[in-house]
Image (tube, grey):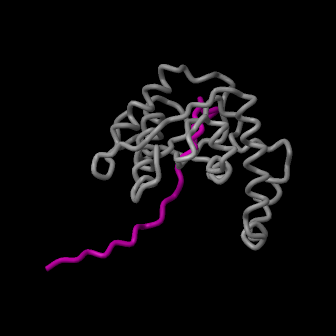
Amino acid sequence: MDLMEAIYSRRAVREFTSEPVDEKMLRELIDAAIQAPSAVNEQPWLFSVVLDKALLARISREAKAHVLKTTAVGLLSHSRHFQEILNDPTFDIFYHAPALIVVSAVTAGPWVIENCALAAENLMLAARGLGLGTCWIGFSQGWLGTEEGKAALNLSPSCVPVAPIIVGHPKSESPPVARKEPQIRWIRP
């Protein structure tokens, strides 16, 4: 698959087969991720690859509870759907994906979020090119940034988890999603 096809066809995947992702493929994704640019070439990233189903289940439980506890009531009440799924003990925020890759910054800094997000996008596009599916799981970010969350990933207290991305073999192809016309302001002499 060429790059433009990967860009135009990459979608958030939330339904996976039970087939595990080969560790060699996971390494290929990380190798693609580290090709991303970074401010002053710091390359501040660290990759935690979680394949342990029990740990994934624990992170899912803890993250749901964390979101419910720390998110303003008004924000959650805005989306009844979010409230329902976060309170559902059977809902797995990782959608039963066989792997979670968390892109973290080794230390806090002025551009670490942007740097790790660039690496994450490379990883997701590479996954699409290899026929894998991915989804950035925002529900897990808050808890992973806690002392307990960092400990679950064996991260030092100075690390900043930025991009929790599930990876797996998609059950089906995602349909195209209509895109809004971009707002473009051309500034010419």
Along the line of sight, the residue nearer the viewer: 124 or 141: 141
Q: Is residue 132 left or right of residue 92?
A: left
- The x, y position of residue 63, in whole percent, is 73, 48
- The x, y position of residue 32, in whole percent, is 38, 34
Q: Is residue 175 visible?
A: no
Q: How many marks?
A: 0
Q: Quadrant of the N terminus?
A: top left
Along the line of sight, the residue nearer the viewer: 175 or 169: 169
Q: Is residue 125 magenta?
A: no
Which residue lies at the image location 50% right of the left edge and 42% below the top edge? 103
Which residue lies at the image location 31% right of the left edge and 52% below the top edge? 39
Along the line of sight, the residue nearer the viewer: 54 or 78: 54
Q: Quadrant of residue 59?
A: top right
Q: Quadrant of the C terminus?
A: bottom left
Region rendered in magenta? 163-189
Q: Is residue 107 visible?
A: yes
Residue extending farthest bottom: 189
From this view, report whether residue 179 is shown above or below residue 35.
below
Q: Quadrant of residue 6?
A: top left
Residue extending farthest front: 157
From this view, report whether residue 141 is shown above or below residue 125.
below
Q: Is residue 186 magenta?
A: yes
**Overall secondary structure of the magenta section:** loop
From this view, report whether residue 4 is shown above or below residue 138.
above
Which residue lies at the image location 76% right of the left edge and 46% below the top edge? 62
Residue extending farthest left: 189
Which residue lies at the image location 39% right of the left edge and 56% below the top edge? 111
Q: Quadrant of residue 54?
A: top right
- The x, y position of residue 130, in whole percent, is 46, 29
Q: Is residue 157 left or right of residue 185?
A: right
